[in-house]
């Protein structure tokens, strides 16, 4: 494919728009990072259980009970993003990529079921 065969829609959909959205996201993160001051103290950084200030040491040091939800997010967020990019792409690129995206989605369905089962087993993450 030659450079002059590219149309403006595909360049906009796969090049300019994602770059601008990424730049906008970084600018918003920088504004919030610089604009919001952290009110210090050990109480703010210490671990809370159920939203209350801790009386004893925390049961679990790390939030491993959220592992299933993290797997769900990490596996399906890229698929949703690709569908979003395909919705604004030209039909030439969308038709070629659509089958691969559907195949990838079908392969991720077992991961979804496993991660849902992991997230339901809260008793495995409680340490007494």
Image (cartoon, rainbow, N blue to C red):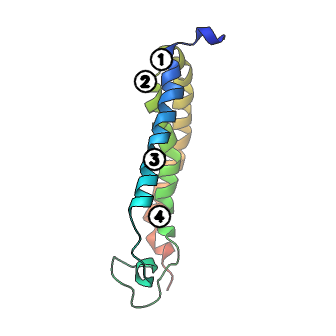
Identify the residue shown where x is 43% and y is 91%. Answer: 56
Q: Are marks 2 and 1 in contact (CB under 8 Å)?
A: yes
Q: Secondary structure at mark 2?
A: loop
Separation of marks 2 and 1 at Cα, in angstroms: 8 Å
Identify the residue shown where x is 48% and y is 78%. Answer: 126
Mark 3 = which residue? Answer: 27
Q: Which mark is residue 113?
A: none
From the top left corner, tell me how far across and down residue 82 is, in percent.
Answer: 50, 33
Separation of marks 4 and 2 at Cα, in angstroms: 33 Å
Q: Secondary structure at mark 3?
A: helix
Q: Earlier in the sequence, mark 4 or mark 2?
A: 4
Mark 2 = which residue? Answer: 88
From the top left corner, tell me how far across and down residue 12 is, in percent.
Answer: 49, 23
Figure quadrant of the N terminus: top right
Q: Earlier in the sequence, mark 1 or mark 4?
A: 1
Please state which of the two labelled residues, at mark 2 or mark 1, is closer to the viewer.
Answer: 1
Mark 4 = which residue? Answer: 66
Separation of marks 3 and 4 at Cα, in angstroms: 29 Å
Q: Are marks 3 and 2 in contact (CB under 8 Å)?
A: no
The reply, left or right, for residue 7 in relation to residue 35 is: right
Identify the residue shown where x is 51% and y is 69%. Answer: 64
Q: Image height check: is 127 above or below 33?
A: below
Separation of marks 1 and 4 at Cα, in angstroms: 40 Å
Q: Are marks 1 and 4 in contact (CB under 8 Å)?
A: no
Mark 4 is surrounded, within 10 Å at the Cα level, by few (under 14), some (14 to 19) or many (20 or more) other residues, namely: some
């Amino acid at each position: 494919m030659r450079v002059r065969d590219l149309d403006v829609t595909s360049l906009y959909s796969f090049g300019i728009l994602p770059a601008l959205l990424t730049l906008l996201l970084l600018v918003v993160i920088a504004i919030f990072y610089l604009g919001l001051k952290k009110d210090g103290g050990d109480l703010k950084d210490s671990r809370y259980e159920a939203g209350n200030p801790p009386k004893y040491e925390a049961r679990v040091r790390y939030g491993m009970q959220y592992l299933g939800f993290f797997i769900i997010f990490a596996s399906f967020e890229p698929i949703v993003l690709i569908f979003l990019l395909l919705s604004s792409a030209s039909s030439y690129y969308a038709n070629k990529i659509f089958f691969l995206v559907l195949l990838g989605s079908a392969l991720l369905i077992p991961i979804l079921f496993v991660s849902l089962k992991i997230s339901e087993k809260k008793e495995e993450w409680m340490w007494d």
